[in-house]
């Protein structure tokens, strides 16, 4: 049942919002709409809070889920998880490339020289 719920969340919410956030960042559209902003803000906060453990947890969990969904022959779930495993690093890369920071819960491009005042 958990796989089913996670698959529905991936297909109808997480993947579309993450993809839209990636495309918005790639095209330099600021400020981001509400849900896209939340996805990016939460990624930045998570990366700052737990550092290198964040991608390790992400890849560990999702590789396990892919193998588990294949083992139980939940092909649509495996495909959705694989799709998210492609989109997520694209979004993270775009966040790093744009040097996006969090200023009062809004995603903004960082100022030249690193001055955040």
Image: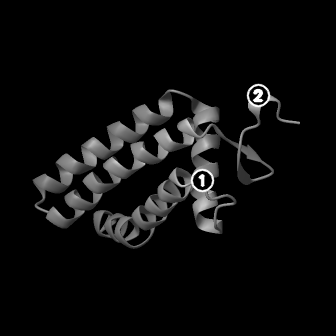
Q: What is the number of callouts on the image?
A: 2
Query: Are dots 2 and 1 in contact, CB under 8 Å?
Result: no
| Nearer to the camera, 105 or 64 | 105
Local crowd size for mark 1, using a 10 Å CA cut-off: few (<14), some (14–19), many (≥20): few
Q: Earlier in the sequence, mark 2 or mark 1?
A: 1
Residue located beneath label 2 in the image: 114
Q: Where's residue 55, x and y in %? A: 44, 35
Residue at the spot 59% in from the left edge and 40% down from the top edge: 98
In the displayed structure, would residue 114 be above or below residue 86?
A: above
In the displayed structure, would residue 72 be above or below residue 58?
A: below
Residue at the spot 72% in from the left edge and 39% down from the top edge: 110
Q: Quadrant of residue 37?
A: bottom right
Decide if residue 93 is on the left or right side of residue 11: right
Residue 39 - label: none
Q: Where's residue 49, x and y in %? A: 64, 34
Q: Quadrant of residue 111?
A: top right
Disc 1 is placed on an element classified as loop
Residue located beneath label 1 in the image: 28
Q: Quadrant of residue 58?
A: top left
Q: Nearer the viewer, mark 2 or mark 1?
A: 1
Residue at the spot 29% in from the left edge and 63% down from the top edge: 3
Which quadrant is the N terminus positioned in? bottom left
Decide if residue 103 is on the left or right side of residue 86: right
Residue at the spot 77% in from the left edge and 26% down from the top edge: 113
């Amino acid at each position: 049942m958990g796989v089913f719920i996670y698959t529905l969340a991936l297909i109808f919410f997480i993947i579309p919002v993450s993809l839209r956030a990636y495309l918005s960042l790639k095209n330099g559209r600021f400020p981001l709409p509400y849900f896209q902003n939340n996805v990016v803000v939460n990624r930045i906060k998570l990366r700052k809070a737990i550092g290198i453990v964040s991608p390790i947890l992400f890849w560990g969990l999702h590789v396990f889920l892919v193998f588990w969904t294949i083992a139980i022959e939940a092909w649509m779930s495996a495909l959705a998880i694989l799709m998210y495993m492609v989109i997520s690093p694209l979004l993270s890369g775009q966040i790093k490339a744009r040097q996006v920071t969090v200023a009062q819960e809004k995603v903004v491009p960082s100022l030249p020289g690193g001055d955040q005042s």
